[in-house]
Amino acid sequence: MKKQNVRMQQPAMDRRTFLTALGFGGVGLSALIAAAGNLLYLKPAVDYGPPSVIRAGRPEEYKEGIKEVLEDQRVVVVRDKKGFAAISITCTHLGCTVRTSDAGFECPCHGSQYDNDGFVTGGPAPRPLDWYQVSVAPNGELEIDKSVTVAPGTYFKA
Amino acid sequence: METPTQPADGGSGTPTVIASEAKQSRAVLFGRNVYRSLFRYGKLPVDAEGQSYAVFNNLFLHIHPVKVSRHSLRFSYTLGLGVIATALFLVLTFTGIWLMFYYFPSATEAYGRMLDLRSAVDFGFVLRNVHKWGAELMVLVVILHMARVFFTGAYKPPREFNWLIGIALLLLTLGLSFTGYLLPWDQLAFWAITVGTSIAGYAPLLGPPLRKFLLGGDVVGQEALVRFYVLHVVILPGLLSIFLAVHFWRIRKDGGLSHPNDNDPPLNGGSR
């Protein structure tokens, strides 16, 4: 059955194997590209969420020593001697909303505790509460950019 | 005594009677053909070969092997958990499709639609509650089914691949449970999914992109609701149906439910 041509070297791969590999390889590669395209399609390209830059009223509306919770924006505006700060009230553990307590903040979901500057004092939270960048908008209102975090203890002087 | 098939006048029937009889017999023949085309096996089978043939040629019965070991027919062996899980999936599919007539995956509409289903729509509260409690029960039954398979050693060769299919079915069941939990769009749903997707975000490397993929953004909002809805009503049930078909097929191909070798002595010492 096996006819060997003595004058020819036996090829490393015969034609049938090569064409089969080419065919399956092509189909496999196409499938991979199609899968990657579908995944890219599902990756959120446009952010339809709430805007990250919010206005929080005029600076003089805040008395010194106040902690004003803006529940819908999930941020607390703090004013003390050093100036203004906007601290996130989204727990860094699993995203619940923290509430103010005598010591600072506490999370009702799993008991994380934070001090007044948002540093963790107890519970499962892995890192301090985020501090957002505060500035003054052209119309004189406080502007909080929730997409920009600043180091804890960074106050804005209005 | 006359048999009912004989003409009443003793055999000397007029041509009209014969014509009507022929007409009737054509109709009977047609009806019989229709019946035969639907149910290939006419009479109820009485012998073993006929019974095997009847099971083999029926789409709904051929889910069973042609021969079932009498060991696996003992109710206390399986407790019927797999069948119960399948039945619950069917119930959830039908109640779910019915709920889709009124539910709307919109951040402003969804909660109100859910309340309407509970209070205004006729039998809406029945469908919603059957769907809800059936879903809770299905998670429980699937886990119990898995425990049964483990304790009876039914995961062992040649059934080890079907155990893996079963794992996929468990994960799909949990996925359906999780995605369905957001749809009422109440406080419980919102915070459960906030916490749940945050947990997913802790997974190394794949966690943050997975969270973003599920939510369609950074927070639980309209995008998350639509994504969970599509996953819940189309993608996950579709995948589950495919895996379910493979699961059943493998049961047959692996020789039916796990059972002692038929040559082994009976476990209870009694007669076979």
Image: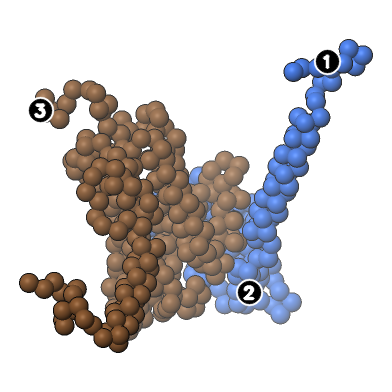
Chain colours: A blue, B brown
Amino acid at pointer 2: Arg
Provide the residue designation for mark 1: A4
* Residue B157 appears left or right of B199: left
What is the chain identity of the residue bearing mark 3? Answer: B
Q: Are marks 2 and 1 in contact (CB under 8 Å)?
A: no
Provide the residue designation for mark 3: B270
Residue in view at x 25 percent, y 42 percent: B48
Residue A144 picture location, percent across and down: 64, 67
Q: Are marks 3 and 1 in contact (CB under 8 Å)?
A: no
Amino acid at pointer 3: Gly
Between the residue at mark 3 and the residue at mark 1, the CA separation in whole angstroms equals 68 Å
**Is residue B179 or residue A149 the one in the foreground?**
B179
Residue in view at x 49 percent, y 78 percent: B108
Closer to the chain start, of discs 2 and 1, is 1
Between the residue at mark 2 and the residue at mark 1, the CA separation in whole angstroms equals 85 Å
- Residue A55 numbered mark, or none: 2
Secondary structure beneath label 3: loop
Q: Nearer the viewer, mark 2 or mark 1?
A: 1
* Residue A41 appears left or right of B33: right
10 Å crowding of disc 2: few (<14), some (14-19), many (20+): some
Visible residue check, residue B56? yes
Secondary structure beneath label 2: strand
**Is residue A13 or residue B173 the one in the foreground?**
A13
What is the chain identity of the residue bearing mark 1? Answer: A
